[in-house]
Amino acid sequence: MTFDKQITIIGGRNIGNEYLSNDQNSQFADLDVLLIGKVVADIDNSFSSYWSSPLSFDIETLVKPDNNTAPDFLAALDKLGQDEKGSDNHLTVYKEALEESTIDSDLVNKRVPFRWTDMQFLSDDVGKLTKTVPADTNLVHQLRTLLGSPTKKLTIISSYFVPTKDGVNTLVQLAEAGIEIKILTNSFDATDVTAVHSGYSQWRPNLLRAGVKIYELKSTASEEKRENKLWKARSQSSTSLHAKRLPLMTIKYSLAPIMSTLALPISIQKWV
């Protein structure tokens, strides 16, 4: 989300109550970054390239209006902020947060404590979708070139961690070479997509035997009886990790074989 090409917010958060600490049954633990400076132009240019692409279609092209259903649709929108009893009391936390927020005045009066650093924005070229750009412009290749080779530590935070066989082999090789590897992902109880967890759990023993330290986020649901997870995607009340991060603890890291098989993180943090 970019405002007037001056300030932007990027991250993994979607628009929904469970992403904004306003759902009684489930919460997604996520992370956003507020950015200003030259990097905002790079982010805006990337968005614009997708927005203006021939592959982008406006809603009127995809969906034809039906005047007979328009009133029902608008009425349904009005009820989005209400619970089953027609009350909006469940929005109290969200409303209070908005009312108490000072981010607007803090930005105007330059009170936001920005942490200044060199930053490089990477993204896929929209031409990747039509295979009209060289392969070395893909995000995976850019990351391989930028990050280099690991020397000390590698920490991966991924809500949907699916390393596959090649990724596991690479992580095992790094661990056996003395690289300290830590991974944080969702537990089976906390995940909202059980199919993803099944793609990770089969590799867990191999990683643990190699010395990789794996941490799984625990659901904060009450002790109610769980429903069959084969049929339900999540429990009735829970917290689920949604952030994707690769904190880099030395000057350079290489994730070349892994990056081709993992869902790419939203952002890369490099710490020297």
Image: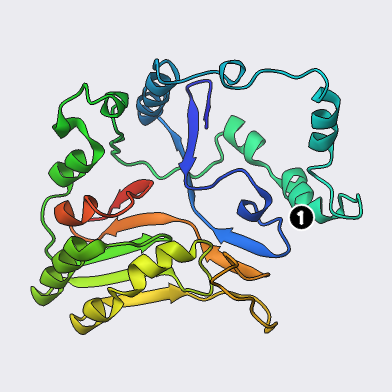
In the rendered view, does 12 fall on the left or right side of 238?
A: left
Q: Nearer the viewer, residue 267 or 197?
A: 197
The vertical placement of 81 against 78, above or below, is below
Q: Quadrant of residue 58?
A: top right
- Quadrant, the C terminus: bottom left
In the rendered view, does 23 fall on the left or right side of 54?
A: right
Q: Nearer the viewer, residue 75 or 64?
A: 64
Q: At numbered mark 1, what does the secondary structure look like: helix, strand or loop?
A: helix
- The 10 Å Cα crowd at callout 1, few under 14, some 14 to 19, many 20 or more, is some
Q: Position of residue 150 (x, y in %)?
A: 13, 60
Q: Nearer the viewer, residue 202 or 268?
A: 202
Q: Quadrant of residue 236?
A: bottom right
Q: Position of residue 76 (x, y in %)?
A: 81, 37
Residue at x 80% of width, y 23% of height:
70
Spot the residue most to the left.
Answer: 177
Number of callouts in the render?
Answer: 1
The vertical placement of 206 against 166, above or below, is below
Residue at x 22% of width, y 78% of height:
206
**Colour scheme:** rainbow
Residue at x 21% of width, y 81% of height:
211
In the rendered view, does 78 fall on the left or right side of 230?
A: right
Whether residue 253 can be seen here: no
Q: Position of residue 201 (x, y in %)?
A: 35, 74
Residue at x 28% of width, y 27% of height:
125
User: What amino acid does circle 1 point to?
Assistant: Val
Whether residue 270 can be seen here: yes
The vertical placement of 175 against 196, above or below, is below
Question: Which residue carries the number 1 mark?
Answer: 93
